[in-house]
């Protein structure tokens, strides 16, 4: 039924395309996220029967009738609300003001509510094209309910069922008909923004940092943990460059125990990590480092992403807490002592100017390739000064080395025997000292040369490649 592309930030997406933007707005629980999933063809937006699941503006790439566009899911837009609900509504209004086309979703089975009428008045003031989706028209019996929405005075209601897909083609035709006549040409792959994920356990200040970096309220911030549920992509101008920042839900420790929206939100955060090139892991200095903090860092290393450690809420740090924090860092983060560290405050803006240099350092290391000749010349000198330890009465030799890949750097050592873990850690440390590699994990593996005549004896045995 639908044509679609992957969500933004995927392998084939071009984050810098200037595409028409469609904002999907409406009061809470009318089926906006379900309709977005129907349009893009897969479940990317978090959907749950509970009102208020979507809280931020979340963009996805879509395709219909050969036209690419960005569709923006928003939180429920209601009037006369306060607190978190008011902030969510403000985000929806911002999305409508910046969109090329507004897709207004109304629950046809409920009819026109005071909130729908109030939102309609705001939409008229934007002077943007509005397409009215009469959702939850699952069959012919609900058709009269859709016709009643003519009374909103914003044009033809399109009967639609986000659940079953009924009428979505006609709805999309109406949306595409409102697009600007020409789309801008694509930017080259070399010019696309680098993708940076903001990760951390819940309530460490990820959304606050994104808002501070952007210089405006791009995402919802609230003291309640778990406010962010979708992975939110935002293009931000910083340090003379455009960056694509991905705000994520906090990664929770007991993943299997999560239910509903929190479960899918954690899935989104993990997917965002895979899409990113670099990760800023936020750590709350006002609390002791937790198991969740370590797990987030480990996940970043396992994914092979460039890493920056951002110690947030530094303005709250007392002298005593700082003493213990440094002890915790030495004890618990020694494995990532190579990662650039910035001490920041997303609330006050402290040290925001240090984030871009740290990202650039990590990404430069992540991209680095060492020529085979340079690598083997270096290796010869290192091994001559510190040979591998004897194992089983024999000393293994390193015959040759090559860098197999970058992003992250991956090195293969061709050896005559197994190299102890300690010696491989020594080589990794020397690689960092002599070639840089600040801010990136390094993968170091071995290819052990089999002895002549041992091929029969080794048949059926597992391959002897070893990887750290």
Image (spheres, grey):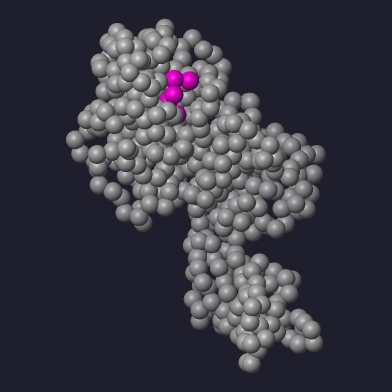
> At 56% from the left edge and 45% from the top edge, which residue is drawn?
270
Do we see residue 213 in this rendering? no
Q: Is residue 63 left or right of residue 278?
A: left
Residue 2: image quadrant is top left
Q: Is residue 391 left or right of residue 297?
A: right
In the image shown, does 447 or 16 lie closer to the viewer? Answer: 447
Q: Position of residue 208 (x, y in %)?
A: 56, 33
> At 22% from the left edge and 33% from the top edge, which residue is drawn?
180
> At 25% from the left edge and 17% from the top edge, which residue is drawn?
156
> At 37% from the left edge and 48% from the top edge, which residue is drawn?
13
Q: Is residue 328 left or right of residue 151?
A: right
Q: Which contiguous range is marked in magenta? A: 29-33
Do we see residue 448 in this rendering? yes
Q: Position of residue 339 (x, y in %)?
A: 62, 55
Q: Position of residue 338 (x, y in %)?
A: 64, 59
- From this view, report whether residue 284 is shown above or below residue 384: above
Q: Quadrant of the C terminus?
A: bottom right
Q: Is residue 275 left or right of residue 398?
A: left
């Amino acid at each position: 039924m639908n044509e679609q592309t992957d969500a933004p930030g995927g392998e084939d997406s071009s984050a810098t395309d200037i595409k028409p933007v469609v904002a999907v707005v409406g009061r809470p629980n009318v089926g906006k996220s379900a309709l977005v999933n129907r349009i893009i063809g897969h479940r990317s937006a978090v959907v749950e029967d509970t009102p208020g699941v979507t809280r931020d503006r979340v963009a996805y790439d879509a395709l219909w009738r050969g036209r690419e566009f960005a569709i923006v899911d928003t939180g429920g837009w209601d009037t006369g609300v306060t607190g978190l609900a008011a902030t969510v509504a403000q985000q929806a209004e911002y999305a409508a003001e910046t969109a090329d086309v507004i897709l207004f979703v109304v629950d046809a089975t409920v009819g026109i509510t005071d909130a729908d009428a109030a939102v309609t008045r705001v939409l008229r003031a934007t002077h943007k094209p509005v397409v009215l989706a009469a959702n939850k028209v699952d069959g012919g019996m609900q058709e009269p309910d859709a016709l009643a929405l003519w009374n909103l005075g914003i044009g033809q209601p399109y009967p639609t069922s986000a659940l079953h897909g009924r009428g979505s083609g006609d709805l999309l035709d109406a949306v595409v008909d409102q697009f600007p006549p020409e789309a801008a040409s694509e930017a080259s792959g070399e010019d696309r923004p680098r993708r940076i994920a903001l990760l951390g356990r819940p309530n460490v200040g990820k959304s606050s940092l994104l808002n501070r970096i952007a210089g405006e309220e791009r995402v919802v911030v609230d003291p309640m943990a778990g406010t962010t549920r979708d992975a939110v992509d935002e293009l931000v101008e910083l340090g003379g460059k455009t960056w694509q920042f991905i705000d994520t839900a906090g990664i929770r420790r007991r993943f299997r125990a999560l239910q509903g929206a929190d479960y899918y939100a954690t899935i989104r955060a993990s997917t965002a990590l895979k899409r990113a090139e670099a990760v800023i892991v936020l750590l709350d200095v006002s609390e002791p480092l937790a198991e969740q903090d370590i797990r987030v860092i480990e996940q970043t290393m396992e994914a092979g992403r460039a890493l920056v450690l951002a110690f947030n809420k530094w303005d709250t740090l007392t002298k005593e807490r700082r003493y213990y924090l440094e002890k915790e860092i030495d004890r618990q983060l020694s494995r990532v002592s190579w990662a650039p560290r910035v001490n920041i405050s997303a609330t006050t803006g402290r040290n925001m100017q240090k984030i871009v240099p740290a990202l650039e350092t990590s990404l430069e290391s992540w991209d680095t390739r060492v020529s085979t000749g340079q690598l083997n010349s270096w290796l010869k000198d290192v091994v001559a000064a510190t040979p591998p330890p004897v194992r089983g009465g024999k000393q293994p030799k390193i015959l040759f080395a090559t860098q197999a890949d970058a992003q992250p750097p991956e090195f293969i050592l061709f050896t005559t025997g197994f190299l102890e873990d300690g010696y491989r850690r020594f080589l990794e440390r020397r690689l960092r000292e002599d070639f840089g590699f600040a801010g990136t994990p390094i993968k170091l593996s071995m290819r052990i040369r089999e002895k002549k005549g041992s091929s029969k004896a080794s048949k059926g045995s597992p391959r002897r490649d070893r990887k750290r």
